Amino acid sequence: MAHPPRRLLDASRAPISPVSRAALLVALDEGWADPRRLHAEGRRARALLDAAREAVATVVGARPDELSFAPSPTLARQLGLLGLLHGRRRVGAHLVVSAVEHSALLHTAQWHPGQTSVVGVDGLGRVDLAAFGAAVAVPGTAAACLQAANAEVGTRQPVAAASDLCGPVPLLVDASGVIGREDPPTAWDVLTADAGGWGGPGIGVLAVRTGVRWRSAGPQDESEQGRVPGEVDVPVVLAAAAGLLDAEARRRDRAAVARGLVDRIRRLRVDDVIAVGDPDDRLPHVVTLSTPYVDGETLADGLDRRGIAVASGSACTASTLAPSHVLEAMGVLSHGSVRVTLPLDPVPEDVEALCAALPQVMAEAQHPG
């Protein structure tokens, strides 16, 4: 029996881009040495690492010495937030986060022994600015966190306005899903990003502005300006940097295509399927479909059997069976959800296949047998 072609519409984690792959293969031969060594091989690896750091720093709007690489985006987020809290521990231990932050930041906030204020969002997933401003004005506030945009529903956050409200309180901005896809945010004190979002290997990026009171919350290491312990993987970093430069050069054309395809999905009319998030002020490549009366995993499985890969559940929890904390914060009545994240080079036929299959899969889920 012939199998349907595979259609990847879950690019939250996807194969690395051809440019990243080519750079990785070259770097495995040229950049394998320890960049801390003074021999020729070490100096060559150092030169490659420095070039990669400068390239990524230029795109995200940081100085090279402000930017570090982490083995994963989760670790970058955790280290970024813990470093702020540790660096400003004499100011206080109050932390402000939005209710729709990545689970890595919310888990860090729960682990943090001080008080945490979780600021709610509206029905589109956008943070309540008035409540955010009131929270950061509490005496003893050490840090605040606000994502650049939500990777689950696509809604952009008012980062610049939130930064103005923060005043002297440093703001950590998680720019995952934005870097390499849209203009990077500029109003931040600490920035984190996920190289997997732009077609690179899934390492993390951590940038700390000069002058920000950031201190490592664990044993310091000579590596990565003392921000990230352990040795840096030069070939992987070089591949991530090459992928970012390619994504940055092509992002405007890609975004226009992706926005049109997501609009096509959002216009689809299927009973008991609701597109959530801001329809306009959003990431171009992300859409979540809420299914109030049908289990999201059932839909994802039905689509998968038709060769269409989508995600279900929360975008950032360890178990995709867990209810979405983002949809819950938005007040969305949802028994389940499916999330479409278009790849860097989306195929219109894949989206048309999804639009054709979804009504059939919904009907099967609502009337099994």
Image: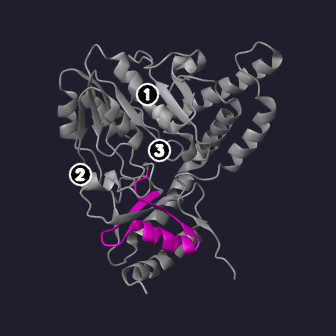
Identify which amino acid the numbered label 3 is placed on: Val
Disc marking residue 80: 1
Question: Which of pointers 1 and 2 indicates the residue nearer the eye?
Answer: 1
Which range is magenta?
286-315
Q: What amino acid type should be assigned to the residue bearing mark 1?
A: Gly
Q: Looking at the figure, which quarter contains the N terminus?
A: bottom right
Label 1: state its secondary structure: helix
Q: Earlier in the sequence, mark 1 or mark 2?
A: 1
Q: Is mark 3 on a helix, strand or loop?
A: loop
User: In the picture shown, does residue 369 fall above or below 39?
Assistant: below
Q: Residue beneath label 2, please?
A: 122
The residue closer to the viewer here, 64 or 280, is 64
Q: Position of residue 363 (x, y in %)?
A: 40, 82
Local crowd size for mark 2, using a 10 Å CA cut-off: few (<14), some (14–19), many (≥20): few
Q: Mark 3 points at which residue?
A: 178
Q: Is residue 26 left or right of residue 238?
A: right
For marks 3 and 2, the one nearer the N-term is 2
Q: Position of residue 333 (x, y in %)?
A: 26, 64
- Gap between marks 3 and 1, in whole Å? 18 Å
- Label 3 environment density (alpha carbons within 10 Å; few <14, some 14–19, many ≥20): many
| Viewer-side residue, 343 vs 228 | 228
Q: Is residue 305 magenta?
A: yes
Q: At x 67% / y 30%, what residue is drawn?
A: 233
**Position in image of residue 171 (x %, y %):** 34, 29
Position of 279 compared to 182: left or right?
Answer: left
- Within 10 Å of disc 1 (Cα), the crowding (few <14, some 14-19, many 20+) is many
The answer for how far apart the CA atoms under marks 1 and 2 are is 27 Å
